[in-house]
Image (spheres, grey):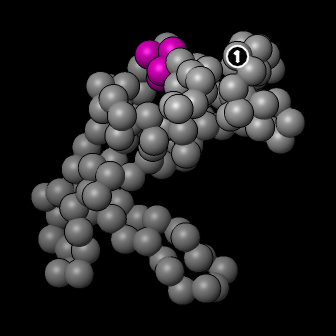
Amino acid sequence: MTITPVDISVKTRFITEMKARVTSAGTPISRYLEKYSLPGYMWDEIAGAALIDPSIITAQKKLYIDIDIDHGASYGKTIFWDSKTQVPPYLRLADIQFDIDTEKFYRLSIDLISRPPRP
């Protein structure tokens, strides 16, 4: 299991200049982004890009993870423990991404968004 937390996503932003660059490609996805996207963090894009090219992640650590899935006030709250910590048996180790090569990530994102669809 690999987790892309908010902490790494704040190092990336889909900004107006990037939007202008990809929308000029005229691809279906770039037209969609031109119409519907807003500037913001790119957490989903990081997760997807890391599957395509894991080398964009420059630091990660194995930690135990617990996520609150009760539909209450703390829904989604995530707690991490060091891999050496004694934890309940139901917790699992996960790879937590901590740092990213932003330039490489931006290049990959722009390239993928700008490519024409396959026939």
Secondary structure at badge 1 equals loop
Q: Residue at x 43, y 72 (%)?
A: 67
View extreme (front): residue: 119
Residue at left 51%, top 31%? Answer: 118
**Residue lying at 23% horizontally and 69% vertically, measured from the top left:** 92
In the figure, residue 71 lies in which quadrant? bottom right
Q: Is residue 10 above or below residue 110?
A: below
Q: Is residue 84 visible?
A: yes
Task: Residue 18: give x, y in percent of width and height.
Answer: 71, 18
| Residue under the point 35% across and 40% down | 51
Report x, y in % for residue 7.
51, 42
From the viewer's perspective, is 28 left or right of 118?
A: right
Asked whether 115 or 6 is in front, the reply is 115
Above-or-below relation of 91 to 105? below
Q: Position of residue 84 (x, y in %)?
A: 13, 58
Type of the residue with mark 1: Ala
Q: Which residue is mark 1?
A: 25
In the displayed structure image, the side of residue 81 where residue 20 appears, left or right: right
Dominant secondary structure of the residues highlighted in magenta in the image: helix
Q: Is residue 39 in sight in this rendering?
A: no
In the image, which residues are magenta?
104-108
Q: Position of residue 23 (x, y in %)?
A: 76, 21
- Mark 1 surroundings: few (<14), some (14-19) or many (≥20) residues within 10 A: some
